[in-house]
Image (cartoon, helix red, strand yellow):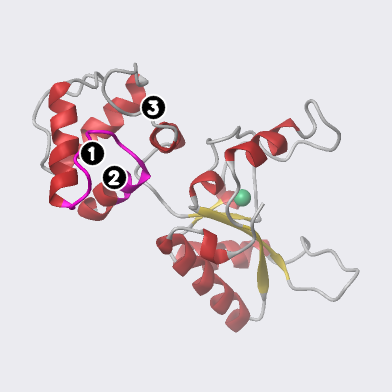
Amino acid sequence: MSRDVTDLLPAARELAEAMLVATEQAGYPVFITSTLRTFHEQDELHAQGRTTSGSIVTNARGGESRHNHGLAFDVAFVRPAGEDIFDGPWDQIGAIGRDLGLEWGGDWTGFVDRPHFQVPSPYDVGVLKAAATGRLRRGIGAAKANVIQLQTLLRQAGLYGDRIDGDFGPITEGAVQTLQREARLLPSGMVHPRELEELQRRLS
Ligand SMILES: [Zn+2]
């Protein structure tokens, strides 16, 4: 598991660095405890408190956390040795993150995760996971919900005018190829994280 901000995608890295500066300036300095996790590391973390010892720390399996996609980081408070690094003014830290445009795990209902911050993304983790594992392309039975989200965003970007039906057919594939050609990526018709980034860039 990495705690290096250079392992994050550029947008997340920029916000993580801004967070360190802003919390220092506010008088509540924090440090980064976690950035990128591999799918395997996430699966091991998910097992904790379920099939291995310890308490449950996450509901996300491999690919289902923004940490697995370079879009999230965790923080703790800078404290003298021996003191609890998770005991501090979380609400102030959460507000600083929100002001920077981050989503804060302390705002979640259900599983509240106060050390956690992530970059807002138009994609559910299912789409990110499908792209990372090559399961978002024509001819492999991509999950309908993921294809619906992709088609919706392709339409918003002006690249897709057909039905939003969750079926990754030739017209969806053609829209992905148009996106790729315009971005000077290989027009493979396959959606990878870089195609999602390109689409997000066009929509922002
Ligand atoms: Zn986290």
- Mark yes or no: residue 69 visible: yes
Q: Name the residue under label 1.
A: 153
Closer to the N terminus: mark 1 or mark 2? 1
Between the C-alphas of marks 1 and 2, the distance is 12 Å
Residue at disc 3, CB closer than 8 Å to ligand 1: no
Q: Where is residue 25 in the image (x, y as percent from the top left)?
A: 58, 83
Q: Name the residue under label 2.
A: 195
Q: Is residue 2 magenta?
A: no
Q: Which amino acid does label 1 sit on?
A: Leu
Look at the image and give the residue range highlighted in magenta. Answer: 183-197
Q: Quadrant of the C terminus?
A: bottom left
Q: Which of the numbered marks, if any, corresponds to residue 135? A: 3
Picture mark count: 3
Location of residue 174 with respect to 167 vertically, above or below: below
Q: Which of the numbered marks, if any, corresponds to residue 198? A: none
Q: What residue type is labelled 2?
A: Glu
Closer to the N terminus: mark 1 or mark 3? 3
Give the class, few, some or many, for how many residues have Cα within 10 Å of label 3's Cα (few <14, many ≥20). many
Name the residue at 41% across, 31% down.
130
Side of 95 relative to 28 (left or right): left
- Mark yes or no: residue 111 visible: no
Q: Which amino acid does label 3 sit on?
A: Arg
Along the viewing direction, whichever of 160 and 189 lies nearer the viewer: 189
